[in-house]
Image: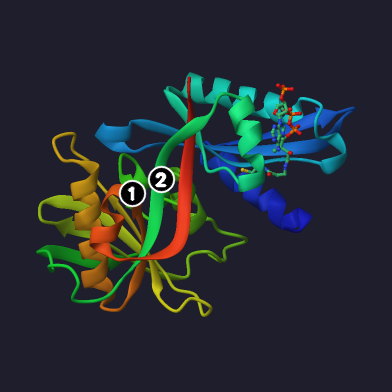
Amino acid sequence: MSVETCAIHLNNLLTRGQFPLVALVDGRVVGEAELLVGHEGERRGLVAHLSVIDVHRDYRGRGLGRALVEASKKLAQDSGAEMLTVVPEEEAKGFYEALGFALRERWIEVEVTPGRLREPHMEAGLVSLDPEDFDGMELVVGRYQSGANIAFNLCEEFAGCEVLDAGTSWAGVVEGVEFVAHFWEAPFLDRKKAYVWVKPDARRSLEDDVRLGVSTALALARSPISALVPEAVARELGEPTGVVVEFWGVDL
Ligand SMILES: CC(C)(COP(=O)(O)OP(=O)(O)OC[C@H]1O[C@@H](n2cnc3c(N)ncnc32)[C@H](O)[C@@H]1OP(=O)(O)O)[C@@H](O)C(=O)NCCC(=O)NCCS
């Protein structure tokens, strides 16, 4: 990121009520973290997710990473969250272990081809995405980070240019369940990457909503899609691509 783009990015986070944090040594910024918080409805409640944490290499090993995580935990707790989650890079797992995080969920990316799943009954229309569309909605397909993270990425604007919102978005009702779906379509991808949020209901299971989300995405895309789904339902829905996302968490 250029300095200018970074300034817009931080401003976008702040105007959406999110939390960029910095670590200062003698007045210089030597570390940064980004905490995103969003309400994902009845099942998950308020989700707090640490999407970025980086300490300048000359300043590592001095407790700054720990300080950024502790400050994030405090902000998350003050916001009303009960857990802080991360998706650790392989090399950073030891760091998170030292701070009390442990594996909570494993999600697997699968490729799904048309005809594989029953087409659900739905009413849907094309929409342009707005951050408010995601309040109280749970990200059940494409959970590479939290619902708030992906929603922020898709809606982030740089000087009026929605650089990340490459693709099409749909909203509607599928078999009585409210949903928002987005397809990320980039020239370097050979299939559409699907994201689906649903309005959760504690009487329905996450797995059932994931099945509904994937069949909705497939019916809308009418082409092969890649879908990140919980490990428990991955093999019944498609062929694994090799991408595995581990969610680690610490109770607050
Ligand atoms: C991961 C990172 C943020 C850690 O920051 P840091 O300031 O060096 O960490 P701290 O000094 O606060 O370390 C806190 C504890 O974690 C331990 N720790 C830090 N990195 C570790 C690692 N890679 N493996 C095992 N333990 C580690 C430290 O020993 C320390 O334990 P202690 O307090 O019991 O002595 C930093 O290494 C970094 O910026 N890495 C590159 C970016 C990155 O990988 N970010 C995470 C993406 S998910």
Residue placed most toward the observer, 94 or 221:
94
Residue 248 on image: x %, y %: 49, 36
Residue 85 on image: x %, y %: 49, 34
* Tag 1 and tag 2, C-beta contact below 8 Å: yes
Which mark is first along the chain, 2 or 1?
A: 2
Residue 252 on image: x %, y %: 48, 19
Q: Residue at x 76, y 37 (%)?
A: 31
Residue under numbered circle 2: 106
From this viewpoint, is residue 129 visible?
no
From this viewpoint, is residue 133 visible?
yes
**Would you call the spot at circle 2 few (<14 residues within 10 Å), some (14-19), or many (20 or more)?**
some
Q: Residue at x 42, y 23 (%)?
A: 82
Residue under numbered circle 1: 230
Dot 1: what SS? strand
Image height of 163 relative to 55, above or below = below
Task: Report whether the residue tagged 1 is closer than 8 Å to ligand 1.
Answer: no
The amino acid type found where label 1 is placed reads Pro
Compared across the picture, whether 69 is left or right of 151 comes to: right
Residue 171 on image: x %, y %: 26, 60
The amino acid type found where label 2 is placed reads Arg
Task: Report whether the residue tagged 2 is closer than 8 Å to ligand 1.
Answer: no
Say which quadrant the N terminus sits in. bottom right
